[in-house]
Image: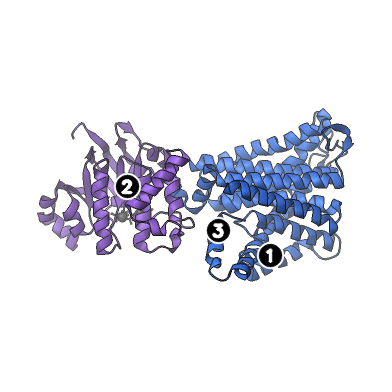
Chain colours: A purple, B blue
Amino acid sequence: MPGNAVVETQGLSVHFGGVAALDRVSVAIAEKELRCLIGPNGAGKSTFFKCLTGQLKPSEGTVQIRGEDTTGWNPHEIARLGVGIKTQVPSVMNGLTARENIWLAAKRRNTARQADRIVAETLDRLKLGEFAGTEVVRLAHGQRQLVELGIVLAGKPWLILLDEPAAGLTGEEVQRMVEVIREMNTEASLIIVEHDMHFIRSIAKIVTVFHQGRVLIEAPVETVLADQKVRDVYLGRKG
Amino acid sequence: MKTGREILLTAIVGFIFMFALPLLLSHYTLTVLTAFAILALSLGFVWGYGGILCFGQAAFYGLGGYAFAVAAINTQMPWLGFLAAILIPAIVAALLGAMMFYGRLSDVYMAVVTLVFTLILFKFMNTTAGEAYRIGSARLGGYNGIPGFPTLTKPWNPTDYLYNESLYYFAFLLLIALYLIVRLILKSPFGRALVGIRENELRAELMGYDVRLLKTVAFTIGGAIAGIAGCIFANWAEIITPNMFSLGQSSEIIIWTIVGGAGTLAGPIIGAGVLGYLKIALGENSGLNNFFIMGIVLIAAVLFLPRGIFPTVQSLLSRVSLGRPRQRISRRRRSRAG
Ligand SMILES: Nc1ncnc2c1ncn2[C@@H]1O[C@H](COP(=O)(O)OP(=O)(O)O)[C@@H](O)[C@H]1O
Ligand SMILES: [Mg+2]
């Protein structure tokens, strides 16, 4: 693997009882890369993200982030390295306003005044201004997804993990999501889990396909989408 | 500034109550109710804003009382006792909190651990009747407790004791001050992060907040405030007994908070005042079991005032004075104001 990897896992395995959710996964992501992660439900994509962010301790294997071995670190320690994640089930502070959610993310690394400025920028960038004072629990699904994205952005991470960011969004919202992702990619490395093939085609470069906890194939998007094994996996046939 | 105005307004309301309440009740009764109110404030903060359901707030209350008595007897300087009544419960809360939060105990285990911790203190204090159980010149006294310790005096005149009227005003001023301090804490980045943790612990961690540390700090602050309540109680009763650690005391604090309105600060204070008075009025030996009455009150409150006295009154008032649309705003404010 190239020496400029910002994230590198080696032999990463996670067992839940007898089930291997991840089975010796070795993946490396380069600086400023935009990597797509696809695979059928239960392939282990979210579990992989949980290992990267410290929500799960792997049963075996290691995670390196910018050359540091972060295996077994706590989530807040990994976040402080500059890693942001949008989880599959939106994880927001429901009883607080959109503004307060984003402010808390911004305040962690900044003074209160800087945080106020970052909040204004972020709300503007995601066109969330009119919902800024609304409790997140009252927002529609797409808006909540955007608030969570705002939380991630406000932390100014250089490594961003997005777990199914387009799920449940309207066409217009997906379009805005794609724009924001392209913009983020100018400053940060991204790993994106997504099912929406249209979405994948419009942003992906290299795609990693997970299947039953293993890496099935890792290749440029055209190659992957033309691959017979990948088609079989997605159609539910055993290859 | 907004914060400045709020402090001023709160202080004014506090002072009005401080001078008006003695028109209704004796200073003596009001003093112990104020101690209860401070105790409820501590749980209102820890539980209502920190999201930490502590069944053992009585432990810090009792430790505050004992720390005061022991330090006052040994040093003959009651104000050192006051300091001890803050520090000792705070240190114990920090240790217990660190153990729970760094050990990642689940909410249910946390409730059990805090409750068991209180019961252990209760049992232990009851066994300290022997001559051997002494700290310096203070005998712990088992179930008889510790009587006859020097109580607080006016700082400018060490022979002028705070009792009855003066003790009441001192206690109530403390209540106002502590309420304001907690309010300011909640407005600070630390307090806002704490509420964020209550709303979504995982998200707070993914933002980079050290949840274990922040919760431990919140728990420590709660312990210190409960300790102050214990100190006021000790000065009022002029004797302390292991009953401060009892199961009854532990559960009452939670009932005060629920009935008054968890998720606000004024709610638990009001709950403590109203229910504390109810208990005194019914009398300890009236034949009616106090546990029974408290149970009924709790069930009635949960059924008819599920949000508690204070939030209900608050939203009624704002609906009456400002019309319907305000209702939404007052609900949203629940986590911040009160
Ligand atoms: N907490 C858990 N306990 C038990 N099994 C789990 C848990 N989380 C995930 N799994 C299992 O691990 C496998 C991978 O899940 P996941 O990573 O969520 O897949 P994906 O995100 O690719 O859909 C699935 O078989 C799932 O049922
Ligand atoms: Mg998933």
Residue type highlighted by circle 1: Leu
Is the C-beta of the residue carrying label 2 under 8 Å from the nearest atom of ligand 1? yes
Read off the residue under disc 2: A49
Q: Quadrant of ligand 2?
A: bottom left
* Residue B230 located left or right of residue A50: right
Residue at which label 1 appears: B298
* Rendered residue at 55%/56% (across/down): B335
Dot 1 lies on which element? helix
Q: Few, some or many C-alpha atoms within 10 Å of disc 3 (few <14, some 14-19, many ≥20)?
A: some
Do discs 3 and 1 share a chain?
Answer: yes
Residue B304: horizontal and vertical position, in percent? 65, 71
Mark 2 surroundings: few (<14), some (14-19) or many (≥20) residues within 10 A: many
The answer for which chain carries disc 2 is A
Q: Amino acid at mark 2?
A: Phe
Quadrant for residue A56, please give it: top left
In the image, is residue B208 above or below residue A165? Answer: above
Which residue is painted at 77% across and 57% down in the image? Answer: B276
Q: The residue under label 3 is which amino acid type? A: Arg
Q: Are discs 2 and 3 less than 8 Å apart at CB?
A: no
Q: Chain letter of disc 3?
A: B
Classify residue A39 by image quadrant: bottom left
**With A88 as the anchor, is B133 left or right in this view?**
right
